[in-house]
Image (spheres, rainbow, N blue to C red):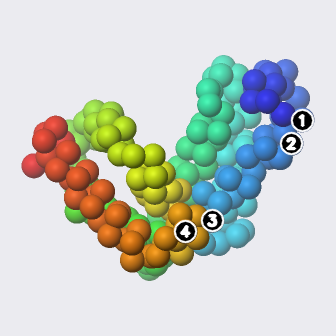
Amino acid sequence: MDDSKIIELFFERSEQAIIELSNKYGAVCRKVADNILNNRLDSEECVNDAFLGVWHSIPPQRPDPLISYVCRIVRNLALKKYHENTAKKRNSQYDVALDELAGCIPASFSVEDAVMADEAAVVIDRFLETLDQPGRILFIRRYWYGDSMEELAALFHRSRQYLSVRLSRIRKALRQHLEKEGIIP
């Protein structure tokens, strides 16, 4: 079903909207949550909570594209749950991806840093536009969706080593870009 029709179902307050949303984007949403949480039950809970969040936000919102809107809600809920679950322990797959970015983005944020977060997002978006399409996809799949290196190797038909080097070069370029733009010292 077309996204605009799904949104119209939400505006009509039809429960069919949740069914159609789940049919169209449920697998992607579960993948995002699974990559962060590594726990099927927690992932299902996040996806269900996200769909409830979409139910409460549409209307008045009319997101375009719908998948980005839903995935962002799922990701935020999964990250919240992740931090609750791992307050004293580490989740290897997602922590590794976060650790890779540690050299590019400061670990702690002050209030001033939080105010600059929107500006940083715009700068990162501009940086991503400078990458070729495979580089952009690789970066987003690793650091937004949290795909493992094994999944990326299968997706790109490349070795883990090749992708690791490619990601390292992208992170180095990102750090230089953020320094040039004054986002990080």
Instruction: Name the residue nearer the viewer: 42 or 183.
Output: 183
Q: Helix, strand or loop at disc 4?
A: loop
Residue 54 vs 10, above or below: the answer is below
Dots 1 and 4: beta carbons under 8 Å?
no
Q: Is residue 45 left or right of residue 10?
A: left
How far apart are the alpha carbons under marks 1 and 3? 25 Å
Q: Nearer the viewer, residue 163 or 16?
A: 163
Disc 3 and disc 2: Cα gap in Å?
Answer: 20 Å
- Identify residue for label 4: 157
Q: From this viewpoint, is residue 87 visible?
A: no
Horizontally, residue 39 falls left or right of residue 52, namely left
Which residue is denoted by mark 3 in the rendering? 34
Amino acid carrying label 2: it is Ile
The label on residue 19 is 2
Residue located 46% across and 61% down the image:
142
Front position among marks 1 and 4: 4
- For marks 1 and 4, the one nearer the N-term is 1
Which residue lies at the image location 75% right of the left edge and 24% below the top edge? 4
Q: Of the residues under marks 4 and 2, which one precedes in the sequence?
A: 2
Q: Cβ–Cβ below 8 Å for labels 3 and 2?
A: no
Circle 1: element type: helix
